Image: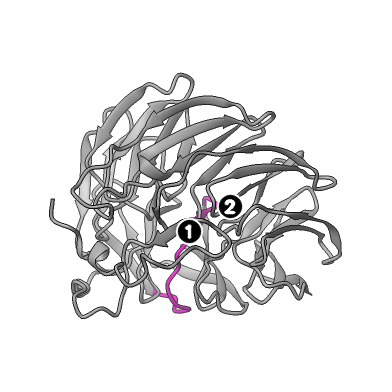
Amino acid sequence: MNMPAGLRRVATVAALAAMLGGCSTVTGWFTGSDNAPKPTPLQAIQNNVTPKVRWDVSLGGSADYAFTPALMGDVVWAAGRDGQVVGVDVNTGRQVGRVDTRLPLSGGIGAKNGALYVATTEGELVSLDENGKIRWRSRLTSQALEAPQSDGQRVLVRTNDGRLSAFDADNGKSLWTFQRPQPTLTVRNYGSTTLVGGEAVLLGMPGGRLAVIGANMGDLLWEASVSTPRGASELERMADVASRPVFDRGQVCAVAFQGKLTCFDARSGTPMWSRDVGSSQGLTVDAVNLYVTGDDGTVWAFDRATGRSVWTQNKLKYRNVSAPAMLDRFVLVLDGEGIAHLLSNESGEFVGRQSVAGGKTQTQPQSLGDRVLVQTQGGRVLALSL
């Protein structure tokens, strides 16, 4: 098996231990290496539908971390590396709150029922009210790189040592912990956990595994293989599910880094179909198709029912392309230069393009139907619309 260029470039970081964790972490695609494939030059297109920046606010840059905003009611909450937290009206972009927590943060923010949740670089989970007052603090077993999630009763946090932990949303009391052994090398993971209502948690794991956990007790409902690791070296065998699994209409889908894309029956865990597409970026779905950004920046569409290939868009290869998000009926991705691309959901052809600047995003854009939320490495929080 030929090692992808992205893996060749991780050699300089593979020996770095994850802060407060026990495993080394690597990421799939880096820029700045002489051996890196050259980004595909953009070709001129006719802008039939132009994505626009509806509003944007500024926070501090993310440094080596990645942040995601959260919607609570009509307010988008976002946090920055230096502890700044801002609330923005989702419809108007008007700033309705800004708090300096003075905490060094390591990931995005969670928000539910009037409470905000952040994780610090020192391995703490902190709950705030909307005025920034600390409600409670709880010690984590390791640093959390992805945003806490809450269903109103409990707060779920995935830490860098592979644990998924639940805490009481009212007082921060530890409720349960789910853990699987971690391999020596893992893909640096900014979000591979999906809370489904108050019932279940979809958990992407190293080694191409997917687990569905009961949210109430932390019990294993089912576990399945998304992709089987393969290759001669430890780097080649990395096949982590390092992006958020998706649940929709009785179907659970997940994708593994340099591995496979697989969809399962949500109730039984029985595989429905699988395709040889690897990704650490992520996927999204609409009523008919599944869309995924491959490891090399190619964007794919597959029929959700059969796994049949619907279209492939390969004119963004090696451009550090984000996971896809639905903007109305279109598929939106952002590249590493801060350019938003709109693709037809039916053909994959470019229908619109707009520079939004602010740097690249390492986390998946969040679809709100008629707009998409993005938080960039440069510290901007954007709402994009048509």
Q: Is residue 319 magenta?
A: no
Q: Residue at x 57, y 61 (%)?
A: 68
Tell me if 360 is positioned left or right of 378 in this view.
Answer: left
Q: Kindly report the distance in space between the C-alpha atoms of the residues bearing marks 2 and 1.
A: 21 Å
What is the x, y in percent for residue 325? 43, 53
**For mark 1, what is the residue?**
365
Q: Is residue 363 magenta?
A: yes
Tell me if 43 is positioned left or right of 211 in this view.
Answer: left
Query: Disc 1 marks which amino acid?
Result: Pro
Colouring rule applied to residues: one colour
- Give residue 270's quadrant in the image: top left
Which is more foreground, mark 2 or mark 1?
Answer: 2
User: Callout 2: 10 Å neighbours few (<14), some, many (20+)?
Assistant: many
In the rendered image, is residue 316 in sight? no
Between discs 2 and 1, the one toward the N terminus = 2
Tell me if 166 is positioned left or right of 41 in this view.
Answer: right
**Residue closer to the observer: 149 or 12:** 12
Tell me if 263 is positioned left or right of 217 in this view.
Answer: left
In the rendered image, is residue 285 in sight? yes
Q: Residue at x 22, y 52 (%)?
A: 233
Image height of 259 relative to 265, above or below: below
> Which secondary structure, mark 1?
loop
Disc number for residue 235? none
**For mark 2, what is the residue?**
159
Query: Are the two marked residues, 2 and 1, in contact with CB atoms closer than 8 angstroms?
Result: no
**Residue closer to the observer: 76 or 295:** 295
* Residue extent of the magenta highlight: 355-369
Query: Disc 2 marks which amino acid?
Result: Thr
User: Callout 1: 10 Å neighbours few (<14), some, many (20+)?
Assistant: many
Q: Residue at x 79, y 53 (%)?
A: 115
